[in-house]
Image (cartoon, grey):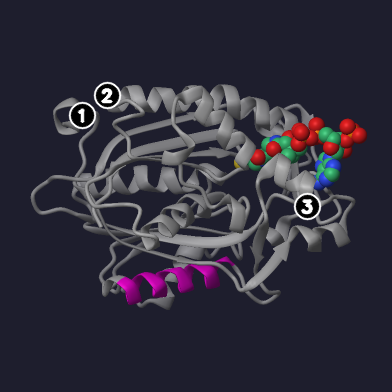
Amino acid sequence: MYEAKTSAIHSNAVITAIGTYVPDRILTNADLEKLVDTNDEWIMQRTGIQERRIASDNQFTSDLCFAAVHNMIERYAVTVTDVDYVIVATSTPDAIFPSVASQVQAHFGMNSSGAMDLQAACAGFAAGIQLANGLLLSGAYRKILIIGAETLSKITDYTDRTTCILFGDGAGAFLMEASNDGQGNVIAVHSKTDGAQGHMLYRSSLAPMLGEHPIQTNGLIVQNGREVYRWVVTQVAAGVCELLERSKLTTTDIDWFIPHSANMRIITSLCESTGFSIDQTLTSIRAFGNTSAASIPLAIDEAVKANKIKPGQLMLLYGFGGGLTQAGVVLRWSL
Ligand code: COA
């Protein structure tokens, strides 16, 4: 039925494998109570986060990417040595350069692959799918690996109770290939950025100012939680509706809504204002916290492993966060 209604964009990109990885170490709300003045009840009620995974001191974003791709190879028996392009969406690269994607290329011996990191914060994974779809459609490439991966624990201020309760580490990968019949999985895309609000959520580096706003330069995450919350429930909700419109679908046509797992209270508000039900919404928030670019593939993979998602089903992925930026994709699941 949906095929007759959808003609939003062209696509020849098919998802052929998924893999994920999270570090072993768990940071619970009880652990956080020992670090800052907080408690499990407050965190659960405000965020829905029970625990997060934390990379070890010598484990970096590239290591999480390697593990997620190994997981994908083991489960789907795919080869990656012939990948044409690697895109890693991350805000926590091991180094500014070489990119994490370059390290993935080397680790797996992808001898004729291009590589780049994509920095769109929590919108990064959906932006990566948009980019991969365009590259595959152009005919320039036939096999693209997209990874969303973060070690946010390395840039989290564990003395700031308003941020340290939120963030965790993890990685998720999709393999996307050009189909031979020209039929792809991507149905519609939408992006929107409000750069003037960038100072509301940032990780500083070299510059002491963002636009006209003086910022901290300690390299850690800083946010105005209330303003970010307000932006999500108004602007991001509007963006989700715009993506639905572009896809010519309704919330009841979509089988699964996968918003970025920022926090459960935000997701509940997004559902209320967009018309999605909580039952059709997939998140990775309870067990992994906010893992930025990794949160969407982690949520999808949890549902894949639980046999919830079936081939042919429709899903709406929607990332949002630092920038402030948003990116979403409607796609048909093919695994
Ligand atoms: N534990 C206990 N109390 C806390 C706390 C914590 N971890 N963090 C803040 N508080 C306190 C505040 O100090 C404040 O106390 P006061 O009233 O005595 O001043 C009170 O709780 C309310 O603070 P406020 O900042 O208004 O809380 P909130 O209801 O807005 O919740 C967030 C804080 C961060 C959970 C919420 O703003 C939020 O979810 N924002 C969006 C953040 C986000 O998702 N960012 C990533 C986007 S990708």
Q: Which residues are magenta?
A: 61-75
> Is 119 in front, or is 335?
335
Of label 1 and label 3, which has the lower sequence position?
1
Q: Is residue 224 visible?
A: no
Q: What residue is shown at x 53% (from left), y 52% (from top)?
A: 284
Badge 1 is on which residue?
6
Badge 3 is on which residue?
40
Residue 254, by quadrant, is top left
Q: Is residue 66 visible?
A: yes
Badge 2 is on which residue?
248
Say what secondary structure mark 2 lies in. Answer: loop
Dot 1 crowding, Cα within 10 Å, few <14, some 14–19, many 20+: some
Residue type, label 3:
Asp
Q: Specify the quadrant that holds the C terminus.
A: bottom left
> Is 263 in front, or is 73?
263
* Label 2 – label 1 distance at C-alpha: 6 Å
